[in-house]
Image (spheres, helix red, strand yellow):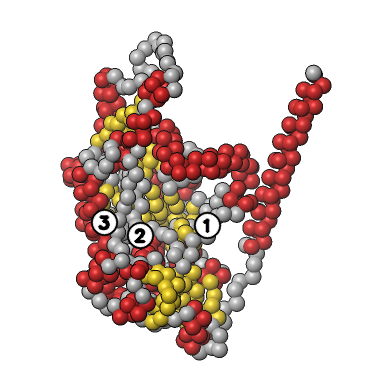
């Protein structure tokens, strides 16, 4: 018996070590490949080259290494780092070897504000006097929005072009939770704080409908006006396209309606590009091959600007998103860094933990007190709820017109699983306690006394949030409360309400900060350094392997039930005090 036990035990240990060794070798291969790719020779840029932007995959604010399992086994989406793309466009504008830009629209997914940022960069490029051509086999609405900035748009003879306006769809889980015997108890401040609604309602509240109709309408007005201006039509025409199921029309209709300028097969586009450059064959350079040097002016006397990225959900800890335990030390180090002249916080977040948001806000205030250096915020697609919390103390706040921001409100969600345990699966519970402060326990409903204590906790969090906003924006508390209540605003409206200072992209923020610093110092140009540094720590990745295997298995097993699992998992993992908006996917 004992011998069999040791044989079995040693066999198991050997299997574990072999698996670890294989995983380690695969990781080393990945790291080696990454290192080799980083040592590739710069692209050869010939006279008459065309900067090619293939809009395929997903746009992210900047490059972040994906999960190790996906790197090993594939399946990772193509990522377009927005910062790298903008650098390429701005660099190409002043490069006399680049004749123009070719937008190859292949259905890349991105946020509304990201698309607006890209349009602004392409507009800057056009001011150099160079051309932009766009082509697609099939135009998605988001890619078409970007493509309209081009001098000429082309489509495949059998292609589709989709313009449909804006919409958002919310999933509601209450009926499912009722069937499971789970009651989600909510305490909140904010009539418009809709992040709790999917767990407590079966359909959208009137307040949420009002705010979504408002910001979708305002965003569509800005978007349709841009399309109309670029295509030389009025917004009535754009709305007619959106109401007519445009993707079902033929290419000749697109041409007649001035949605495109020409109909060509892909090989004919190559011929057109060659003709436009005066070459026998077009020398197309992908943006990531073209970028071999920064697009900004470097020098010892240039303004040195730190751009700190805060992307994702706000949590206290963890390896993903905005974890205060990782971001706060980064801010503290920047406050001690004598080699930077200013800080820009790039925020793309729907919020999260109120506690973590407060820690990040306080660290940023410490940066201001210690350094007296300028601190600006650049908002991406989202800078709402906790995302606005960490932004509100900046000297200047910039947003895109299509940014979603505001949502100044607080809530807490406490699941009561007693129905699930007792009525559904036959588990009874008995609790022995010395005091009545053991809460929450998830095994019973809140008592009136507990509910009152929780509401007071949320109220206090809301008052703190409002005060941070009032102090940061130099507005009376009552003025903040009048536009708070958890309401989400689009960037253009947020500017009018005083929640932001100016509309503009990250490039605009960098230029403005550099101008302010150089005016003070008498220098010129700027150098940008990004934080946190992107690192692939092998030991961290190895520690994640087991959980990633388990998660991948769970995803396969759950199938269509995955959204419900994630909903319950999010509730269970939430800090009791939350300042976040529900994820709003605008289509």
Res 587 seen here = yes
Task: Name the residue rendered at 23%, 48% in the picture.
Answer: 209
Q: Name the residue under label 3.
A: 216
Q: Residues within 10 Å of mark 2 (few under 14, many from 20)?
A: many
CA distance separating discs 1 and 3: 28 Å
- As displayed, is residue 286 above or below residue 388? below
| Residue 105, image x, y percentages | 44, 70
Q: What element carries label 1?
A: loop
Task: Nearest to the eye among marks 2 and 1: give it.
Answer: 1
| Residue 541, image x, y percentages | 61, 44
- As displayed, is residue 324 above or below residue 12? below
Of the image marks 2 and 1, the number of the one nearer the N terminus = 1
Res 511 seen here = no
Q: Residues within 10 Å of mark 1 (few under 14, many from 20)?
A: few
Q: Residues within 10 Å of mark 3 (few under 14, many from 20)?
A: some
Residue 172: name its quadrant. Answer: top left
| Residue 95, image x, y percentages | 49, 79
Task: Name the residue rendered at 27%, 73% in the picture.
Answer: 228
Of the image marks 2 and 3, the number of the one nearer the N terminus = 2
Q: Is mark 2 on a helix, strand or loop?
A: helix
With 495 as the anchor, is 525 left or right in this view?
A: right
Tag 2 near tag 3, CB within 8 Å: no
Task: Nearest to the eye among marks 2 and 3: give it.
Answer: 3
Query: Residue 112 got which mark?
Result: 2
With 126 as the anchor, is 15 left or right in this view?
A: right
Query: Residue 77 got which mark?
Result: 1
Task: Name the residue rendered at 41%, 81% in the picture.
Answer: 263
């Amino acid at each position: 018996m004992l011998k069999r036990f040791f044989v079995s035990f040693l066999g198991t240990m050997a299997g574990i070590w072999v698996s670890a060794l294989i995983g380690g070798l695969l990781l080393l291969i990945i790291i080696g490949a990454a290192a080799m790719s980083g040592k590739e020779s710069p692209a050869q840029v010939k006279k008459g080259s065309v900067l090619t932007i293939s809009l395929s995959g997903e746009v992210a604010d900047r490059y972040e290494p994906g999960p190790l399992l996906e790197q090993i086994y594939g399946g990772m989406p193509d990522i377009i780092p927005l910062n790298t793309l903008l650098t390429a466009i701005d660099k190409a504008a002043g490069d006399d070897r680049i004749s123009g830009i070719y937008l190859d629209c292949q259905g890349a997914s991105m946020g509304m504000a990201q698309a607006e940022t890209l349009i602004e960069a392409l507009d800057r490029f056009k001011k150099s006097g160079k051309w932009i051509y766009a082509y697609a086999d099939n135009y998605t609405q988001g890619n078409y929005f970007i493509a309209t900035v081009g001098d000429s748009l082309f489509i495949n003879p059998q292609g589709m072009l989709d313009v449909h306006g804006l919409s958002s769809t919310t999933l509601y889980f209450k009926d499912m939770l009722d069937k499971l015997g789970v009651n989600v108890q909510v305490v909140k401040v904010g009539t418009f704080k809709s992040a709790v609604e999917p767990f407590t309602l079966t359909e959208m509240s009137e307040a949420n409908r009002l705010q979504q109709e408002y910001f979708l309408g305002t965003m569509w007005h800005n978007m349709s006006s841009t399309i109309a201006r670029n295509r030389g039509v009025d917004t009535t025409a754009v709305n007619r396209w959106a109401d007519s199921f445009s993707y079902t029309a033929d290419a000749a209709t697109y041409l007649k309606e001035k949605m495109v300028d020409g109909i060509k097969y892909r090989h004919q586009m190559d011929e057109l590009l060659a003709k436009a450059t005066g070459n026998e064959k077009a020398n197309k350079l992908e943006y990531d091959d073209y970028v071999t040097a920064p697009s900004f002016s470097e020098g010892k006397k240039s303004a040195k600007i730190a751009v700190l990225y805060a992307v994702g959900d706000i949590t206290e800890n963890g390896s993903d998103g905005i974890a205060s335990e990782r971001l706060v030390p980064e801010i503290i180090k920047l406050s001690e860094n004598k080699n930077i002249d200013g800080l820009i916080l790039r925020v793309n977040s729907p919020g999260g933990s109120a506690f973590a948001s407060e820690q990040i806000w306080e660290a940023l205030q410490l940066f201001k007190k210690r350094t007296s250096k300028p601190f600006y915020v650049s908002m991406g697609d989202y800078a709402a709820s906790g995302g606005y919390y960490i932004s509100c103390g900046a000297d200047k706040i910039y947003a895109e017109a299509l940014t979603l921001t505001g949502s100044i409100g607080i809530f807490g969600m406490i699941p009561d699983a007693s129905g699930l345990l007792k009525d559904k699966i036959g588990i009874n519970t008995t609790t022995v306690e010395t005091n009545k402060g053991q809460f929450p326990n998830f095994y019973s409903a809140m008592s009136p006394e507990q509910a009152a204590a929780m509401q007071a906790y949320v109220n206090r969090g809301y008052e703190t949030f409002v005060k941070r906003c009032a102090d940061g924006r130099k507005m009376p508390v009552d003025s903040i409360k009048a536009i708070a209540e958890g309401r989400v605003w689009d960037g253009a409206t947020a500017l009018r309400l005083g929640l932001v200072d100016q509309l503009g992209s990250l490039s605009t923020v960098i230029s403005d900060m550099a101008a302010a610093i150089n005016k003070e110092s008498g220098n010129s140009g700027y150098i940008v350094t990004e934080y946190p540094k992107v690192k692939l720590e092998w030991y961290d990745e190895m520690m994640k392997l087991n959980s990633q295997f388990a998660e991948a298995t769970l995803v396969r097993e759950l199938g269509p039930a995955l959204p419900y699992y994630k909903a319950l998992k999010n509730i269970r993992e939430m800090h009791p005090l939350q300042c976040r908006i529900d994820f709003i996917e605008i289509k």
